[in-house]
Amino acid sequence: MKKIKTFMLAFVAMAMTAPMFTACGDDDTKVETVEKVIENLVSEYSANDKLVADQKAQSGKDEAVLLVAFGSTWNNAFLAFDKTIEAYETAFPKADVYFCFSSDICINRAAIGENVDDNGNIVKRTYYEPRYLLHAIGAAKYSTIRVQSLQVIPGEEFAAVMAAVKKFMNNGYIASAHLDDNYLKNVKLYFGMPLLTDAENDVPNVANALHTLYGSETGVVAFMGHGNPDDYDTFKANDRYELLQKELQKLSPNKYFVGTVDAPGHYKQNVLADIKDAGITSGTVNLHALMSIAGDHAHNDMAGEGDEYWDGEDPESEDNSWYEYFRHNGFTPNVPLSGKHPQGLLELKSVRDIWIQHTKDAELFEDAYHSMYPEE
């Protein structure tokens, strides 16, 4: 088999066309840069391979769970991720639980410490991409792998998680040594879906959990999800927000409203219009994040308070926070806090348990293996 040689040539060809190489002044510099990139990649894989191999040797377990979140740079989000890992360790006692970010930006910014904890201390966390941990899990030869997407809707970010899993199963990641084809043919890999995947079951289940948590709040309750722009509405997942609002309104008419940061037709302006269409023109609007964690969007786009979050010359600006938008439209906004922060869905046990059930119910990812390097 000519796996390594073939892949290295393909990788170099790909790398040479990437934007990071177009500014190089001569061919020698380009080759040197490519070699450095390959060296760094191999080093990253090796580090993760050792981390996972050590964990498997210590635990003696033959199953692995890989949780994949988009990521964050906020300490309260890190703590929510820690709590989620602990919950999965309890739910899957026979498995080693691993965790990763799908966002390179979040990985890099978390590593340098973009935010502080509640005591003002800079917090740095090290997270990895799915490709590194998937390769490491495969190199350790766990017989069963459960990958769980911690996305809320099956949209653009979920598609990226799915692509990472498929590439792993096709032995498509660069490393110092390739995975055993025979292992990939026989490993049992289960793929857990996002929170609001199934409109028939997931949406009512989440609605019931949220109603139990927030049904006693005085005033209306407005949830802010992320959503995908029209051009990135993968799997037409944005409809989950409208479906969730309908289910919530069945439980308490004219109390619950659902909007997003990015999905057209579900902006804060649309939420305000829905509230007014229900005959409500004043009173309290309780704001909650419909996201796995409370990060930048929850703290700034939703809960941002003060002049820096309001442009009076452009009241409909997307940069205006939900808090200030509702305040300037005659309502009294309220952001319930846990400590000093809004809460994300992973902090809510009843909602987190739905993700865990998805992992337990995940179907076998069958017929996924097709080697990129067939025998010649």
Image: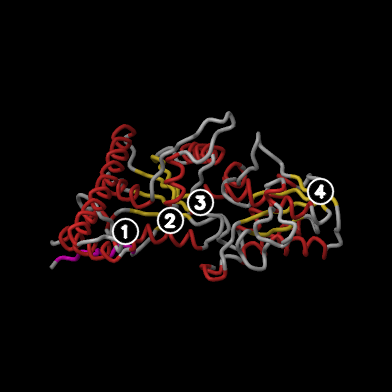
Q: Residues within 10 Å of mark 3 (few under 14, many from 20)?
A: many
Q: Give the amino acid at mark 1.
A: Met
Rendered image coloring scheme: secondary structure
Mark 3 or 4: in front is: 4
Q: Which of the marked residues, 2 or 1, is nearer the chain's N terminus?
A: 1
Q: Are marks 3 and 4 in contact (CB under 8 Å)?
A: no
Q: Which of the marked residues, 3 or 4, is nearer the chain's N terminus?
A: 3
Residue drawn at 66 percent across, 54 percent down: 224
Q: Which residue is mark 2?
A: 191
User: Residue 324 at x, y = what percent?
Assistant: 74, 51
Q: Which residue is mark 1?
A: 169
Q: Which residue is mark 4?
A: 332
Q: Nearer the viewer, residue 324 or 192?
A: 324
The kind of secondary structure element at disc 4 is strand
Which quarter of the rendered picture does the N terminus lie within?
A: bottom left
Write down the region rendered in magenta. Answer: 368-375
Mark 1 → mark 4, Cα distance in angstroms = 51 Å
The kind of secondary structure element at disc 3 is loop
Q: Quadrant of residue 196?
A: bottom right
The kind of secondary structure element at disc 2 is strand
**Magenta residue check for 53:** no
Mark 2 → mark 1, Cα distance in angstroms = 12 Å
Q: Which of the marked residues, 3 or 2, is nearer the chain's N terminus?
A: 3
Mark 2 → mark 4, Cα distance in angstroms = 42 Å
Q: Which residue is mark 3?
A: 150
